[in-house]
Amino acid sequence: MTKNWKNSLALTAITLLSVGMMTSPIQSATHDHAHEQEHVETTHDDHGHEADEHEGHNHGSATDYCPEHQMREKVDALCQAGHIGDLPLGQGMMVRLYDENVAAKTGIVTARPQPIHSLGGETFLGQVALNRNRLAKITSPAPGLVTTVHVQPGTQVSQGQALLTVDIPQLATLKSDYLAAQARVEQSRTHYEREQLLLEKGITSKHEFQQARSLALQAGSDADRYHQQLLNTGLTSDEINQLMEQRHTETRITLRAPFAGTVTDVATAQGERISDQTAVITLANLDTLWLEVAVPETQLQHLHAGAPVQARFAALPGRVFTGKLFFLGTQIDPRSRMLTALAEIDNTTHLLKAGLYGDVALVAEESEQELAIDANAVQMLNNTPYVFIAHEDDLFEIRRVEIGTRTNHLVAVTGINADDAIVVQQGYALKSEVLKASLGASCADH
């Protein structure tokens, strides 16, 4: 080689670190190398180079091993850079960095390929909206005074978790009515049981017995009504049982989450008086969202409930969101000649936000599933596409691929697997290593 190998590596470190953006560490992946390309069968002779040039390499034909990179030379992309162009589709060679911390410091980021369907035909404009089946606007059951706000916008809550504590004067009256109704239940039941016993002995009349029975039923009905009203105000069954045991008339009540979700709005504060007409807290489950899709009337024949859709958004490049149509509008807009259709889409990542606009495409039932990656992950060498795949912190694979259709920032790729950790950011830093090796002398030249 024309330059000292270690000096070249030191220069590489400076180059990589100058680019560096501190991001999340790379992911590791496994790959079966049982079918590594056996395209290099070169015997290395000692050409009498000085001891410090390419120091550490053993070029004897018996070993065919590069101790500098700790791998066989025939799969070493830096030692055999001139043979990368010979790789067939889906095969790769390995690139080992001189330091396992370089990749993280450079800002190399990996991601798994996304399964997509090849799409044909038109795409439609869609807007993200909250799932109205999983949206709750919490109001106070009666006018009161806010004493404690337990959450803030963005708080993740579970079902039954406390949201707001309110002091409601009317609650004292309702509790008193319930306690009085329970007392009448006990009294009327005792009277009814006594009249029943007297009737069996012939001491009382049937009319007296029936009247006692009617009073017992009425008392029970009143107690049930007040019990339900207490439940409607937000008290739990346990809290009502405590009311019966302690017989207190506490006026504070805690409003709780009806389902697990995210608090999206808090419209009150401690010490504020609120009515029973205005929502004070908004809760939404964001795991699924709705897409409001505007479909031209000329495309109605392609729509049906249950049809799969894919959505892509310019604000979220490289991402695909899937769902299904569940509702087709009943009326065409007279001005735009559009029909509004609704689709429910998966948002377990919580990346989508209500109000986002994007392109929505129907997925043909006969379409085949493909693997797609961010278009920035594809690196071109001599007009041939490659991707880099992470195996260890300092070990990457450069693999020959073929690219297919592009949609926004995604590109379909052949030659990768679903569990590959594809380098999607700072891949050009790895590409520069390969280019440097191709410009200098490879191990095969020694």
Image (cartoon, grey):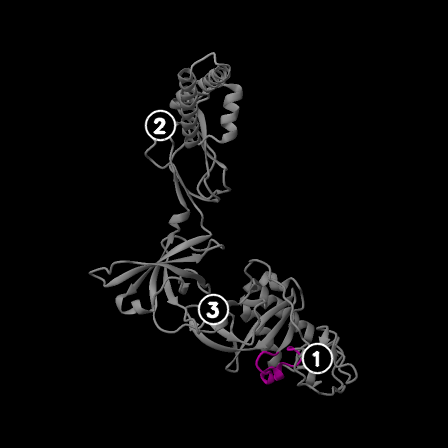
Question: Does residue 368 appear in this view?
Answer: yes
Q: Position of residue 209 (x, y in %)?
A: 43, 17
Q: With respect to residue 390, does 437 lie above or below?
A: below
**Mark 1: amino acid:** Glu
Question: Between residues 367 and 91, which one lies in front from this camera angle?
Answer: 367
Picture quadrant of residue 386: bottom right
Q: Give the labeled residue for mark 3.
A: 116
**Mark 2: amino acid:** Pro
- Which of discs 3 and 1 lies nearer the camera? The answer is 3
Q: How crowded is the residue under tag 2: few (<14 C-alpha within 10 Å), some, or many (20+)?
A: some
Q: Give the labeled residue for mark 1.
A: 73
Residue at disc 2, secondary structure: loop
Q: Tell me the residue at 44%/61% (across/down).
A: 321
Q: Earlier in the sequence, mark 3 or mark 2?
A: 3
Q: Position of residue 129 (x, y in %)?
A: 37, 53
Q: Earlier in the sequence, mark 1 or mark 2?
A: 1
Q: Earlier in the sequence, mark 3 or mark 1?
A: 1
Residue at disc 3, secondary structure: strand
Quarter of the image for the C terminus: give it: bottom right
Q: How crowded is the residue under tag 1: few (<14 C-alpha within 10 Å), some, or many (20+)?
A: many
Alpha-carbon distance for marks 1 and 2? Answer: 79 Å
Quarter of the image for the N terminus: give it: bottom right
The residue segment tinted magenta is: 77-91
Outermost residue on the top side: it is 203
Q: How crowded is the residue under tag 3: few (<14 C-alpha within 10 Å), some, or many (20+)?
A: many
User: Is residue 78 found inside the magenta-colored segment of the image?
Assistant: yes
Question: Does residue 146 appear in this view?
Answer: no
Q: Give the labeled residue for mark 2.
A: 143
Alpha-carbon distance for marks 3 and 2? Answer: 52 Å
Picture quadrant of residue 19: bottom right
User: Is residue 348 found inside the magenta-colored segment of the image?
Assistant: no
